[in-house]
Image (cartoon, coloured by chain):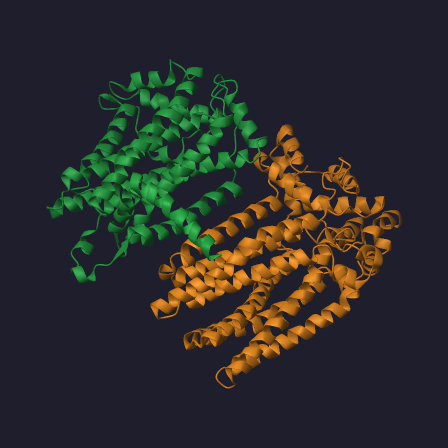
Amino acid sequence: MNYPLWIVPYLGGTWVIGIIAIIHVFISHFAVGGGIFLALSEELAYRRKDERIYDFLKQHSRFFVLITTVAGAVTGVGIWFAVSLVTPDGIASLIQSFTLAWAEEYLFFAAELATAFAYYYTWDRISPEKHLLLARFYMWFSIFTLVIINGILTFMLTPGKWLTTHNWLDGVFNPTYWPSLAIRLLIMLAIAGMYALVTSSRIKEPKFRASMVRYCATWLLPVFLVGPLATIWFLSQIPQSAISSIYTGIQTSGLGNFSILARALYLSLILSGTILLFAFFGPYLNPKAFTFRIATLFMICGLAATGTTEWMREMLRKPYVIYNYIYSNGIHKSDVKELVDAGFLNKGKWASALAQSASSDTERGEIVFRYQCMACHTIKGYRSMKKLLGLLDEEAITRLLQMLKDEDPTQTANAYAGIMPPLAANDAELKCLAKYLATVNVKAREKASNTSVRPEELANKSLSLK
Amino acid sequence: MVSQSKRTNSIIGQVSAFLESRLSLSELKYLGEKKKVPQHKHSVWYYLGGIVGMFLFVQVATGILLMVYYVPDIHSAHASILNINSHINFGWFVRSLHSWGANLMIFALFVHLFSTYLMKAYRAPREITWWTGLLLIGLCMAFGFTGYLLPWDDVSFFATKIGLDIAGKGPILGPVVAYMLRGGDYISQATISRFFAIHVALLPVLVMGLVGVHVFLVQVHGISEPKTFKELPEAEKTYDKFFPDFFLKDILVWILALNVLFGLTTFFPWGLGPEADPFAAAPVGIRPEWYFLAPFQLLKLIPSTVGPIEGELFGLIIIALVALGFVLVPLFDTGISKTRSRLATGFGVFILVALVVFSIWGALS
């Protein structure tokens, strides 16, 4: 509300962030896990004085360094651009709290890049001991980028003591910091193993290939042995309402009321189970038959599992950007009452400036829509308003919006409380928004009245909204 | 530490010696290692039998779980499925696994049928293996037909009604079989009871027995090799040991097939229509399960009378002749005559194309 917004039709701004972020997650996990893999495997080569492992690592590190440095940096900066354009208010709050943390992360990232290049270009040019030292430096620098960014990511779901102290260290070391760090490290090791499976499947000599394939498969073991415990630890620390939404999602699966959260959970479980069984029966028990094609497929499966799990974690935070503090549309929870009383369009700097130049109620309604709804909805596309409004007319939309003002999730009247941010608008603004929304589905309503839809169908369509 | 691991080893040794002397496990292992799987560009089709077997296992496991809560009573059947779907923990999941699993199993069976057919695996000495396979397909379709009615929703009721009416048009035994299956002139409690007994007792016993014979025969004759592979010089032929090499790959394929099943189950859970009302008019667009669509579409296309005989009877005769073609093919194409071999391939391809076209046509019309 204090900044201009970027409008992304059809796809919605959140998906722009989402797509870039998911690629960044893959690459960053790949970078940290791969760093550990390179350092530990080089140590193995050093101890065994095995030239074959050295040769393998040289091959392995070529693509690795290229993708982690270039794609990692590009997507990392891409997230900053996307986030500041789509949710400026949310990111402003995070920057104000974590300036120092991000500065430190940047420092480690720069060190990580420098050591990555030094590591790659000094193969065969410096002594094995020094090269091993470089590998270890790279590993620790990359781990430290995780150590910091993990604090900010987990803070968004469980801000913990920060809500009262506003001390940035309380924010970083929040209730889910440690379990999440453990889970991420485990996933990183697994991803490193899966990528190494792809490269080791290309080794020419069959016996050495089989032994390396088997070695790489063991990198998946930690996530399956310790992962479930770390997940339980993580779940024990997240807000009760997030746990309830998981339970509700599972319980209502059979009734057709199938939440996206439940689907993401199932998908994540299925893919993880597949990876476990596949790793055991494939590369571990039968390394000879593990081909490049199977390895690539396996890697895709692993990335899909990571992506879905990450997606699920994002959804657990709904409807907040920072849990119990800022809603996903950038409105502070504590400001809602004031905005309802004084009016949304009278408060926010940018939104109020826009409202002053608006010439009609519909235009004012559109401004409210952009600032309060477009963080999650599009007109026609992802979470399409056209679809969601069905055939509701202005009066029905007004009633729906009235309901959306209820903030308390324990109140049964608002089925969306706890899932959507409350509508922070005064009565006049609410009417403007209803007027605007009625223009969104006006064609559908005209078409329906021309083809004379039966009243019970109309009722059904409206009910499906609830 | 060392003594403990020695002790553990000796316990494992004793247990395996006990089992070995009673079950001769090493012979089984020997059999598994002796069985060889030819490696060539069509080897991928060798996975199909295993996939069907894996799906069959899923069907048995989920079927037993469903039986715990399902009530085969005309007034309670629908409510019991609703209960499974909405109240029993993960009931919807088990039921969806069973329904989707059945469809995937039948699909895999058809792929298995046509791949073995086109690879000419029915030729001597594998005729009986082929016939048991055909019987198994018939039994699995009977599984599908009987299971479809059990939820007692409107679509399943009317699809069964139409199916039994068509069966009733069959020559000589048709009306008697339809009457016996229905347990009278109309679909009623007797039908549910009969279908349930057939679905959970009769068919499983028959299928298990026949699968035993089928797998035993595969073991006896080894895995069929296509002609192009057989004609290769011995030095150029490569084989995988069935155990453990091929078996481990089999497991990977099963995991992938299970993934497809889980994906369908979780993203498209099996629904339940409104409870069947035998006195209501049939809902619009009633059609059978996809694997009965091709014959159904054929019957729809045939006019009410063809010459002196009734249209439906004529259609049933065509279907019976096609089935007979599959039964007799090992006797017709023994591998000696090239012309007969080509004719058999032509027949198989024609039926495959017809099945696909008629099924799609049936689904769209």
Point out residue A137 in the picture as x, y percentages from the top left corner.
60, 76
Q: Nearer the viewer, residue A31 or B297?
A: A31
The image quarter containing residue A199 is: bottom left
Residue lying at 52% horizontally and 24% vertically, measured from the top left = B78
Residue sitting farthest toward the right: A342
Identify which residue is drawn at 36% across, 52% down. Answer: B248
Q: Which chain is depicted orange? A: A
Estimate the x, y position of residue A157 in percent, counting from the top left. 71, 54
Task: Using the image, determine if residue A175 lies above or below residue A389.
Answer: below
Q: Using the image, determine if residue A338 lies above or below residue A93.
A: above
- Chain B colour? green
Residue at image point 47% right, 27% down: B67
Which residue corresponds to the image point at 48% horizontal and 60% vertical from the top-left? Answer: A218
Q: Is residue A415 left or right of residue B195?
A: right
In the visual, does A358 lie left or right of B109? right
Q: Is residue A262 visible?
A: yes
Q: Residue furthest top?
A: B184
Residue furthest bottom as drawn: A125
Q: Please identify the quarter of the rendering in which residue A247 is found.
A: top right
Please state which of residues B357 and A305 is positioned toward the viewer in this rendering.
Answer: A305
